Structures are given as C-alpha cells and as structure tokens.
Image (cartoon, rainbow, N blue to C red):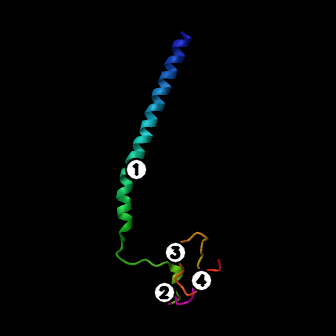
C-alpha cells in the first residue's frame, strides 16, 4: 500500500515538473520569436529625430565645443579621431 502511494506521488511530481518545464520552454521560444521583431524596431527612431545625450549640450542647448574626455581600452582597434594620440 505504501509503495503504491509513494510511486503515485512520484509520478504526479514528475508529471507536474515536466508540465512546468514545457511551459517555461514555450515562454522562452515565444520570447525568442518576438526578440527579432524587437530588434528591427530598435533600429528605427520612434520620434524621427536625432537623440543627443544631455551632457553633450551647453547651457544654451547647443552641442558643446569644448574638448571631451574619452576612455581608450588597450585592445581597441579603432584609431583615435582627434589629433591627440593615446599614451599607450
């Protein structure tokens, strides 16, 4: 009697966990399908305007003319755009 009860309980637990696992996998596959369409939308500008970071603007709201600090990483392959060369 006891072995029948535990085997039934085990079977119910396995079925329940499999049901949950398939539910999670289905949500993942659904999200992956929607992800490609989200990437397509991310390349489009929703306002149609150019977005400028606020720290690049001066008090009058125009792009600043002052020199900006930049960070260069040791394995960066792009050359610096300014006349200053890296100190590496």
Image quarter of the C terminus:
bottom right
- Distance from disc 1 to disc 3, alpha carbons, whole Å, reads 35 Å
Image position, residue 67 (x, y; %)? 57, 87
- Marks 1 & 2, CB-CB < 8 Å contact: no
- Marks 1 & 3, CB-CB < 8 Å contact: no
Q: In this view, does 88 lie above or below 37?
A: below
Query: Quick check: is 4 in the magenta stretch?
Result: no
Image position, residue 78 (x, y; %)? 52, 75
- Distance from disc 1 to disc 2, alpha carbons, whole Å, reads 39 Å
- Distance from disc 4 to disc 3, alpha carbons, whole Å, reads 12 Å
- Tell me which residue sits at (41%, 44%) in the image: 27
Which span is picked out in magenta? 60-69
Instruction: Provide the secondary structure element on which disc 3 rests.
Output: loop
Q: Is residue 64 above or below residue 76?
A: below
Residue where numbered disc 4 is placed: 85
Instruction: Provide the secondary structure element on which disc 2 rests.
Output: loop
**Looking at the rendered structure, which numbered label has been put on residue 31?**
1
Residue where numbered disc 2 is placed: 63
- Distance from disc 3 to disc 2, alpha carbons, whole Å, reads 24 Å
């Amino acid at each position: 009697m006891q072995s029948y009860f535990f085997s039934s309980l085990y079977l119910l637990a396995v079925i329940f966990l499999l049901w949950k696992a398939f539910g999670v996998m289905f949500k993942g596959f659904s999200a992956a399908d929607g992800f490609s369409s989200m990437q397509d939308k991310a390349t489009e500008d929703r306002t149609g305007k150019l977005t400028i970071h606020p720290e690049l603007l001066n008090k009058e709201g125009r792009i600043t003319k002052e020199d900006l600090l930049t960070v260069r990483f040791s394995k960066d392959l792009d050359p610096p755009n300014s006349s200053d060369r890296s100190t590496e």
